[in-house]
Image: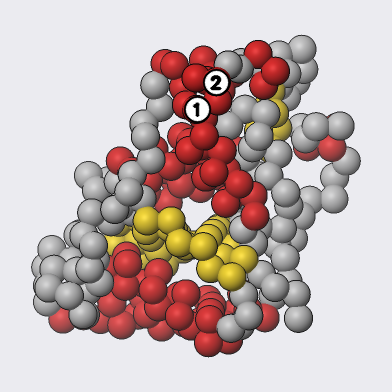
Amino acid sequence: MTTRRILHIDASARTGRSGIDPRGSHSRRLTHRFVERWRSARPGDVVDVRDVGRAPPAPVTGAWIAAAFAPPERRDAEARARLAESDRLVAELIGADIVVIGAPMYNFGVPAPLKAWIDSVVRVGLTFGFDRKRADVPYWPLLPPGKRLVVLSSRGDYGYDPGGRLDASNLVERGIAVPMAYIGLSDVRSVAVEYDEFGDARFAASIAAAERAVDALVDRLVGEGPAATDAVPPAETGRAP
């Protein structure tokens, strides 16, 4: 059996898990359930944990941008040091077969530490290519194909799923899926808990449904191979030739 690698990212400011810790995180509850069920099915696989909620990546600065866009051979020691954390985060992402992100909804979007992680891994020359001479498609994804992204979220209100009453206000899944597709990770699955602010029977039912959905998702992914990739030639997809 080929070993698969899971990158487990948590972003909640709450460090505990609901159902176990007082005022614990629902997104951490779902990511933990996903990883534990995966380990039960495939104990030989590797799980890398990146808790940006506890240890946020440094935000992007002007100096970081200058270093990232400078040709590698022109980066001095200071520039390389500014990119060292990003280099590590990109390496984790490139090495992962499945990326599992716990992303609670904060003010309709993702937590700031998760946005900092996204900004760190969307790197010119590493995860996306850019050539201004290519007038048709100057950008193209560079992540190795076959990866999958799982977004496990929690929301205080309800109706944020596609077609729901607050669908247009949900910037969590979009805020993750759009930049990840930009760099080549376009196979996205998602599960969410809703009704947290109500704390009634609907909330309890939502948690139970989300846990069942996570279990079913793990079972499907365990049985699937790498994500399907587009067989269109690079010149037509915008990938590097």
Do tag 2 and tag 1 residues touch (Cβ < 8 Å)?
yes
Q: Mark 1: which amino acid?
A: Ala
Residue at the outermost bottom position = 40
Provide the secondary structure element on which disc 2 rests.
Answer: helix
Q: Position of residue 5 (x, y in %)?
A: 62, 66
> Mark 1 — residue?
81
Residue in the foreground of this view, choosing between 117 and 195: 117
**Disc 2/disc 1 C-alpha distance (Å):** 6 Å
Q: Position of residue 97 (x, y in %)?
A: 64, 62
> Mark 2 — residue?
77
Tell me what residue is drawn at x 65 percent, y 55 percent: 95
- Figure check: 208 above or below 118: below
Q: Position of residue 157 (x, y in %)?
A: 20, 59
Tell me what residue is drawn at x 67 percent, y 21 percent: 72
Residue in the foreground of this view, choosing between 147 and 13: 13
Tell me what residue is drawn at x 32 percent, y 65 percent: 27
Provide the secondary structure element on which disc 1 rests.
Answer: helix
Viewer can see residue 168? no
